[in-house]
Image (tube, rainbow, N blue to C red):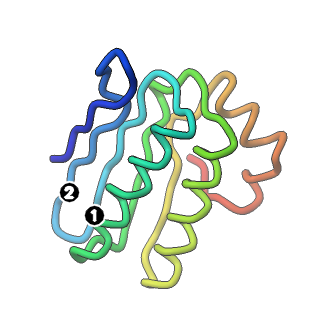
Amino acid sequence: MIARATGEENFMKHSITVSGNQATVLLMDKIFVHDASILRDDLIEIMEGGVTDVRIDLSGLKYIDCSGLGTLVAINKRTKKKKGSFVLAGAQGLPLDLIKRTRLDKVLAIK
């Protein structure tokens, strides 16, 4: 499991649990540019280690900015190249609204 603290308050913004070729990512609180960069690096690292299927749990997420959305799109693209799967789960409130406004719900699998 990877849990990384980000931001000045040292608050954990995401945790990653890996089982075989599958990873579950829990996003929490708010994701801004700095958090998105760390998330992207962590996800690339585990994908280089053999993960092909990524499930992102957004149920604890209150806000995500454009850099965070860009990270989701980039990881989705990487999973497709590896013939894996990418799923967003638990999206609600403002994050879901932003995903729909940017029409990413047409590109990303949302459950």
Q: Amino acid at mark 1?
A: Gln
Quick check: 25 left or right of 58?
Answer: left
Name the residue at the front extreme: 8
Q: For label 1, count other residues whose C-alpha is less than 10 Å away and answer few (under 14), some (14-19) or many (20+).
A: some
Quick check: 23 left or right of 103?
Answer: left
> Horizontal and vertical percent for residue 1?
15, 47
Quick check: 67 left or right of 58?
Answer: right
Rendered view: 38 above or below 80: above
| Residue shown at 39% from the left, 26% from the top | 7
Q: Amino acid at mark 2?
A: Val
Report the Cα–Cα distance between label 2 and label 1. Answer: 6 Å
> Horizontal and vertical percent for residue 27?
42, 35
Quick check: 86 left or right of 8?
Answer: right
| Picture quadrant of residue 20 | bottom left
> Horizontal and vertical percent for residue 19?
17, 60
Numbered badge on residue 18: 2
Q: Are marks 2 and 1 in contact (CB under 8 Å)?
A: yes
Residue in front for this viewpoint, 63 or 52: 63
Q: Which residue is mark 1?
A: 22
| Residue shown at 28% from the left, 31% from the top | 5
| Picture quadrant of residue 92 | top right
Number of callouts in the render? Answer: 2
> Horizontal and vertical percent for residue 54?
39, 60
Rendered view: 74 above or below 72: below
| Residue shown at 56% from the left, 46% from the top | 111
Q: For label 2, count other residues whose C-alpha is less than 10 Å away and answer few (under 14), some (14-19) or many (20+).
A: some
Residue in front for this viewpoint, 99 or 74: 74
| Picture quadrant of residue 3 | top left
Secondary structure state at the residue bearing disc 1? strand
